[in-house]
Image (cartoon, rainbow, N blue to C red):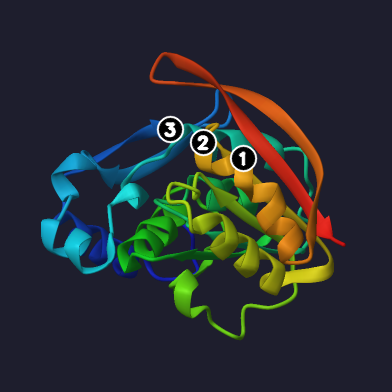
Amino acid sequence: MSSSHSLDHWQQLSDELASRYDLCKGPLGLPGHELTFVRPKSVDELISEEEFNQDGRLPYWADVWPSALGMATRLLREKGEGRTLLELGCAVGYVACIAAKQGFYVTATDYYADAGRFTQLNAALNGLPIPAERMVDWRDYPTDLRNFDVVIASDVLYEKPYCDLVAKCMAYSLAPTGLGLLTDPQRMMAKDFPAAAERNGLRVERREGIPVTKDGRSQVIDLFELRRM
């Protein structure tokens, strides 16, 4: 485990999460880039009608989705070299861990506090630098998340208003010469994302399809690369 905290700290965090979730542990990720991950066994078992009725919240954070594998594929082309990277929606931390492994200083954010805890624990399990973690609501975005060299988001356009919301957050947090990366599993809503990016001062500089395979199913993930206008 990483030495940023004591072994006792990580064991206590692991025990605390295990007391509240039915967990699984094992290798996960891209072929040749698997990491040992702890995560909840079932997303469906975490669905809360109360949380959904309160603010439409669903526990998408509790798995590693194909778009995350697409993002990891893209990040493997980058050398962090001490650059800063912000992730909007870190889930259980696979992409954040790949970014840390590539040499980025990572700040992992999510709407669920436990997503950040799993991200830090999983980084520790793999002996990686521990990402900073923040609980962030895109509708009430922190004013200090500024000037990141890279800002990323994977499979976050699952509601129509999120195109503008995510584009606004990315534009706010990107450094003037920064790179934005967004992956999406070809959702219908994503067709509106380039226009939303433009409204927020970003342009789609490149778009490509990244083939990924998860649980025996192959699909093509859309990747948007963004820069300031």
Of circles 1 and 3, which is in front? Answer: 1
Percent position of residue 90, x then y: 47, 56
Crowding at dot 2, Cα within 10 Å, few <14 / some 14-19 / many 20+, comes out as: few
Residue 146 numbered tag = none
Looking at the image, residue 221 lies above or below residue 24: above
Looking at the image, residue 64 lies above or below residue 210: below
Tell me the kind of residue under disc 1: Lys
Distance in Å between CA atoms under marks 1 and 3: 30 Å
Can see residue 111? Answer: yes
Three-letter residue code for mark 2: Met
**Residue marked by disc 3:** 28
Quadrant of res 72: top right
Task: Name the N-terminal-most of marks 3 and 2.
Answer: 3
* Residue nearer the viewer, 228 or 159: 159
- Residue that numbered label 1 is attached to: 191
Secondary structure under the numbered disc 3 in the rendered image: strand
**Residue drawn at x 35%, y 42% as measured from the top left:** 63
Q: Residues within 10 Å of mark 1 (few under 14, many from 20)?
A: few
Q: Sequence-wise, which precedes: disc 1 or disc 3?
A: 3
Residue 88's quadrant in the figure?
bottom right
Q: Is residue 174 left or right of residue 48?
A: right
- Assign a secondary structure to mark 1: helix
Q: Is residue 48 above or below residue 174?
A: above
Q: Given the image, on which type of amino acid does mark 3 rest? A: Leu
Residue 119 rendering spot, x and y as whole percentages: 43, 57
Depth-wise, is mark 3 or mark 2 nearer the camera? 2
The CA span between labels 2 and 1 is: 6 Å
Give the labeled residue for mark 2. Answer: 188
Residue 87: image x %, image y %? 57, 59
